Image (cartoon, rainbow, N blue to C red):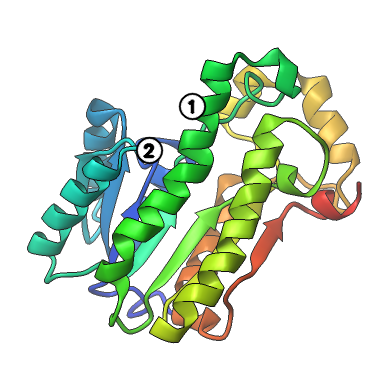
Amino acid sequence: MVDRVTQFEGRVALITGGARGLGRAFGRALAELGAHAVLTDVDKAEVDKAAREITEAGGQAASAHRLDVADDAAWDAVLTDVAALHGGGVDILINNAGLHSLEYGVNWAQLPVSKLRRLFDVNVMGVMIGTLAARPHLQGRLGANILNISSSAAFNGMGAYRATKAAVRALTLAWARELGPSGIRVNALAPGLHVTDTIRNEFTPQMIEGHRHHQFLDLEGTEQDIVDAMLYLCSDKARFVTGETMRVTAGYASSL
């Protein structure tokens, strides 16, 4: 288990897509364990609200920045601000921002080129640009690491969304190899279906049940299952783990 007293004390964790969902949950969990959670999102009003809620709930500290992950100039501006406020560096980067939903989980021909381009800009180039921008701020920080958010979809099927998440797996391995000599670990999480309010609004009960039928375990995944995996991979407990994509799917990604 992660040491709930000292494991993240004083560390700076930058989380993209931090306004809602997993990004907000990651920020809340890290702040509760002593980190300063830097939440970023393209939705400034919502990310401000998320950071405020974390601080008001007693988290160590949280701040918010507007960031479009596909904009390299915006990355440089945010990281410059963060470095100035927190002693020159970042300890943890979580590349969580991504476009998803039933809208993007379709065959290639069902999406116009403009949407395909934006999907790859956010889900793939956002990870690449963010890693490039954060690299000098992570370098030299003891325990520095990057966590990318892939998906169980990366392991099966077809379609544009799945291709972007498979690309995140490949980037994770490539960056782990390149950044390893600098002491920076790079891993990924591949969540399965964790049933949130958003999922309940978007998926029919039959769709959820169909997904669950392909799991090895007859369990309903929750946001906390993914948060717990994040805390492990971002902690020093995972000091010997890099280049890996951890599937948190109740066996779903292995069963197809």
The quarter holding residue 14 reads bottom left
Q: Give residue 91's position: percent from left, percent from top.
A: 31, 70
Q: At label 1, which amino acid type do we have?
A: Arg
* Pointer 2 or 1: first along the chain: 2
Mark 2–mark 1 distance (CA, rounded to whole Å): 9 Å
Would residue 3 appear left or right of 10 to someone viewing this image?
Answer: right
Amino acid type, residue under disc 2 in the picture: Ala
Residue 134 versus residue 57: which sits nearer the camera?
134
Q: Is residue 215 above or below residue 21?
A: below
Q: Quadrant of residue 242?
A: bottom right
Residue 118's tag is 1
Residue at image location 82% in from the left, 35% down from the top: 211
Q: Give SS at disc 2.
A: loop
Q: Is residue 93 left or right of residue 253?
A: left
- Tell me the SS state at disc 1: helix
- Front-most of residues 96 and 22: 96
The image shows residue 200 at horizontal and vertical percentages of 64, 24
- Eyeballing the image, is 161 above or below 126? above
Say which of 75 and 254 sits in front.
75
Residue carrying label 2: 70
